[in-house]
Amino acid sequence: MQEETLVLKQQSQFIPVQFGTRYIIEELTSENFDEFTDLVAEEYHLNDPLSIVLGATSTGYREAMESLKGIMLSQNQGFIARCTNSGMVVGGLTGEDYQAVYDFKKDQALETYYGRLNEGKQILYDRGVLKKEWKISLMTMGITRSTHYQQYIMTVLTYNVMLKAKHLGFEYAVAEVNHIGTYKIFSKDSHKILISVDFHDKYEEIKNNLSQEEKDFIQQSGLSDYIFFMKLDSAIVKRQEYLKSKQ
């Protein structure tokens, strides 16, 4: 009986889906979490437009990741992408229960950012757009190294998070998107925008302190955060078709 139980558990394990040989997709675990934290701390405050606007720092992201380690790992929906040549982690994305509550009070900039997202989430529940009994996975904390093929890596990571969420019994997913490149990918798949959270007011407050390069990057990338909604079954099919077309 014990052997049969072991076999069943092995069969139920999730195996990340790979596309190509340049990157290896791994599940986010306690063994590689520090590498993901390093990536977030090195890249997010430089390559995320809203992080620049809000003044988020590398130290702030590192402390936030360390404080969230337990909940991120317990959700069991995170993935990283590792370059096969260098062995370096070049991308990561987490999937988490949309009902979860996060504490970013260690960093004022991140508290402002996620505070607005939580306000938007509450509006969706209050208006009945989303129902609390639905099992919804939130795709967030997506980041890639600026030196690598960002959109492709993020697409593969997103696909794996979708598959893992479905594997765990989730029926729906929402994606938090604040970069125009990722926005275009989700829009192309005809996913519905539930709400947008605007940060133009914060930009006006600090724009005189920014370099021209930072201003150009922000204008090209966008000043709004969008929450896309999707049914996992159809979203998985669309993402799979897209990735196969790129092989």
Image (cartoon, helix red, strand yellow):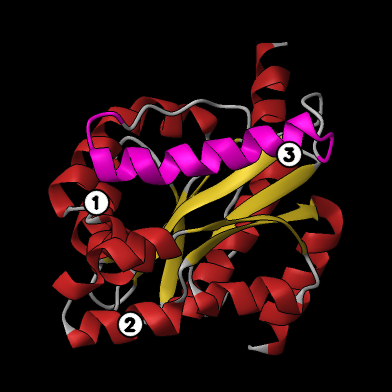
Q: Magenta residues, as a range?
A: 105-129
Q: Which residue is mark 1?
A: 35
How packed mark 2 is, by other alpha carbons closer than 10 Å (few <14, some 14-19, many 20 or more), is some
Q: Hey, which quadrant is residue 99 in on the image?
A: top right
At horizontal 19% and vertical 44% (from top left) the residue drawn is 60
Tell me if I can see residue 149 in this picture.
Answer: no
Q: Earlier in the sequence, mark 1 or mark 3?
A: 1
How packed mark 1 is, by other alpha carbons closer than 10 Å (few <14, some 14-19, many 20 or more), is some
Query: Which secondary structure type mostly characterizes the magenta part of the structure?
Result: helix
* Left or right: residue 153 compared with residue 186: left
Q: Which residue is mark 2?
A: 217
How many numbered badges does the structure rendering display?
3
* Left or right: residue 188 compared with residue 21: right
Residue 86: x and y in percent read 23, 74
At horizontal 61% and vertical 42% (from top left) the residue drawn is 120
State which quarter of the image contains the C terminus: bottom right
Q: Which is closer to the viewer, label 1 or label 2?
A: 2
Q: Nearer the viewer, residue 126 or 88?
A: 126
Q: Amino acid at mark 1?
A: Glu
Q: Amino acid at mark 2?
A: Phe
Q: Which residue is mark 3?
A: 124
